[in-house]
Amino acid sequence: MAEERLEAAAADEYTQDGTVDLHGNPVLRSKRGGWKACGFVVVYEVFERMAYYGISSNLVLYLTTKLHQGVVPSANNVTNWVGTIWMTPIIGAYVADAHLGRYRTFMIASVIYLCGMILLTLAVSLPALRPPKCGAGTADPNCVQQATSAQLGVFFLALYILTVGTGGTKPNISTIGADQFDDTHPRERSHKLSFFNWWMFSIFFGTLFANTVLVYIQDNVGWTVGYALPTLGLAVSIAIFTAGTPLYRHKPTSESPFAKMARVIVAAARKLAVSVPVDPRDLHELDDEYYAKKKTVPLPHTPNLNVLSKAAVKTGGGEDRWSLSTVTQVEETKQMLKMLPVLAITFVPSAMMAQINTLFVKQGTTLDRHIGPDFEIPPASLQGFVTISMLVAIVLYDRVFMPFARRITGNPRGISLLQRMSVGLVIHIIIMGIASVTERHRLAVAHEHGLYDSKNTTIPLTIFVLLPQFVLMGVADAFLEVAKIEFFYDQAPEGMKSLGTSYSMTSLGIGNFLSSALLSTVSHITERHGRTGWILNNLNASRLDKYYAFFAILNCANLVAFFFVCRFYVYNAEVSRVVDAGSTKQQKREVAMQPASVGAVEATL
């Protein structure tokens, strides 16, 4: 007995989840990881969120007021940049998982991020890197003088250096934090849940600070100070994160999920003429001992997407990994591919979200922003209400709605993830309807006061008429975006959770590119044959109300497509047997009891 206790104590000294130090050696639980390591990680996230939102929230105003771009090109430049920001983490996750590891990828990317911030600060500070002031009382009252190619080149080079940096930091920093807790240890597992709460707090705090304090400084003190502060904060946070290096645990690199999926698809393509056996036991699978050693379980064969099952058909002869896959590898690929229609449905609402820091902000510049006689609220600060309303909605959903719905449906989540997403889609329709009505009212006030042809003139209408669309966007995020993140995490196979959560980032990235395409297309079509377009540099002469009504109709069509996709979606094999009340066939479904990857939760903000 004493010998067994000694063995148990020795085993408890080292982590059991496969984490190692930077040299690949096992790590002592008491020396590395836990809260003493996570503090360094959380500090970085606060300042990184400040830096990112300090730029993105007000970027459209800098492009129009300082670089003298029009509404359409400036809005498209913002959405193209944000779209790239959300797409590059897929590459960063691949490099980290398959080659460099999370820590090394993060450190290299964070230096690139800082270099981009320094160059961006110089671009807004040095007179030679921006056109001269224009407007009333200047040598260029009509803002005819545009930024030169060199000035634009330096500014956008800095912005896209940031996309490279965030590509390596965004998918890895949250997982580095989560890696500091051993899921096999009960006490550390409970601490991991608390870490998620603090991580979310760091994101909310950084975002709210950027949307309020930093945008106020940019509007009222200057862009140099407004960009220099988050640059300095980011430099300090990288130094703090680096100081914690001796305390970190690290997950070793593994095979890329893209390579696994590619082998299954290639193997199935090479066997298109082969029939799948009636008995799935005749398909290729490794023995249980192999999976026991990896602390995983094999996935059973399913009939959906049966063409991929041909990859596991044994044909005899010499077969390599590109001609024969296991049933588990095939099922993992099926689970990732069957989520693609749901992913496609999320592109339209992601395009709607892109309006928050583009057209919604530009509308705010035309309205009365005074609070009292001396204080003016920055137009971009209304984005803070998205963050606040989302936080309130999540708490109410978790503490009030979910227990109530759980008693009715018997579903541990209250309602299914797809049902929760559908509520968010409905709210998006309401948002764009309200935005259209509000814009029509704004135009009516402008006409009433003879400001139809007046550019850069304040309309006697409070900026808070825009508040409902910002608040409702936060409520929609609490339903759609949170459910989207959890759905892609939950339905992804165990070995591909990172790829599953990257679907959420892909959704936002493509949604921003879709926003750019829609804005350019609508602007071009409505200006044909000499007509006055819907989106002009003078918003008082534009018809954004029609543009928002078009978005409402587009959201309605997208909702119909979503119901069609849901009708045919089959949840993964069950883990705990719970009836999905959202299914017309009352099928059983998987209920994941793990929290979704917090790396993708940033997408909701």
Image: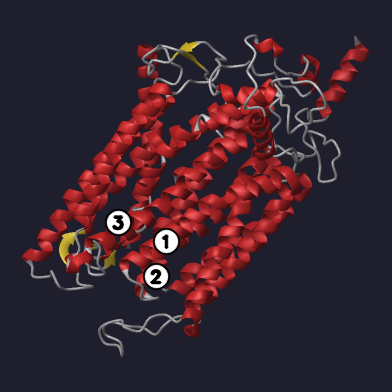
Crowd class of label 2 (few under 14; some 14 to 19; many from 20; radius 10 Å): many
Q: Secondary structure at mark 2?
A: helix
In the image, residue 477 sits, relative to residue 513, either above or below, namely: above
Q: What kind of residue is marked 3?
A: Phe
Q: Secondary structure at mark 1?
A: helix
Is tag 2's residue or tag 1's residue first in the polypeptide sequence?
Answer: 2
Mark 3 to mark 2 CA distance (whole Å) = 15 Å
Residue 537 position in % (x across, y down): 26, 69
The residue beneath circle 3 is 360
Crowd class of label 1 (few under 14; some 14 to 19; many from 20; radius 10 Å): many
Mark 2 to mark 1 CA distance (whole Å) = 9 Å
Q: What kind of residue is marked 1?
A: Val
Which numbered dot is residue 78? 1
Instruction: Tell me how the rendering is colored.
Output: secondary structure
Left or right side of 350 for 235:
right
Q: Nearer the viewer, mark 3 or mark 1?
A: 1
Q: What kind of residue is marked 2?
A: Leu
Q: Residue furthest bottom?
A: 139
Which numbered dot is residue 63? 2
Q: Quadrant of residue 194?
A: top right
In the image, residue 511 sits, relative to residue 259, either above or below, namely: below
Residue 116 position in % (x across, y down): 58, 66
Is tag 3's residue or tag 2's residue first in the polypeptide sequence?
Answer: 2
